[in-house]
Image (tube, helix red, strand yellow):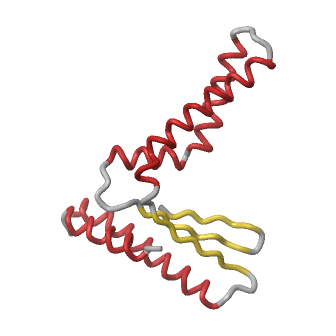
Amino acid sequence: MLRVGYARHWAQYRVTVFPPGINDHERIRLRTRMAAPIWGLLLWLAVWTVVAAMGVGHAVSIPVSIVITAAVVARSAAAASPTRRLVRQMTVWTGDGEEPTSSSERDRLLRMVDLLRHTDSDPRAGRIGPVEHEAVWARCYAELDG
């Protein structure tokens, strides 16, 4: 997963690689945990709307919706926790006055992302099998060690 963010004159590049060999269920848990800020806010708004529609005042509806949302988000985080510790990331900042190593690290990150994207399309096209696909992901995962 590649994310690119911008802050004034700087750009942040981040690649996240899940551990090799995890199953679809674990991958869904990790993605759910990573998206918790978005769905947590939407959940809070939905719960608050429902509780407020019951006719209780804001003094009750807001704290109740916060507690319910916090419990659901905490449960999601706990479910993903064992696998989350194994996820590896690489983050590079580039921009005005950057160090020369920043652009080389960015290029390394972008080459890795390009390789992973091509590797994901290769099994669908029949160019490689599942074992070769997993081996490329494992190699990139190992490269992010540390």
The structure residue drawn at horizontal position 43% and vertical position 74%, both measured from the top left corner, is 145
Q: Nearer the viewer, residue 101 or 124?
A: 101
Left/right placement of residue 20 relative to residue 69 reads left
Dividing the picture into quadrants, the one containing residue 5 is bottom right
Residue 129, placed above or below residue 97: above
Q: Residue furthest top?
A: 55
Residue 84, placed above or below residue 73: below
Number of marks present in the image shown:
0
Q: Nearer the viewer, residue 42 or 20?
A: 20
The structure residue drawn at horizontal position 43% and vertical position 64%, both measured from the top left corner, is 17
The structure residue drawn at horizontal position 33% and vertical position 63%, both measured from the top left corner, is 120
The structure residue drawn at horizontal position 32% and vertical position 69%, both measured from the top left corner, is 138
Dividing the picture into quadrants, the one containing residue 115 is bottom left
Question: Looking at the picture, how far across and down is residue 61, in whole percent?
Answer: 73, 19
Question: Looking at the picture, how far across and down is residue 71, in whole percent?
Answer: 58, 31
Question: Looking at the picture, how far across and down is residue 42, in whole percent?
Answer: 63, 34
Left/right placement of residue 85 relative to residue 59 reads left
Dividing the picture into quadrants, the one containing residue 53 is top right
Question: Looking at the picture, how far across and down is residue 83, in whole percent?
Answer: 41, 52
Q: Residue furthest bottom?
A: 100
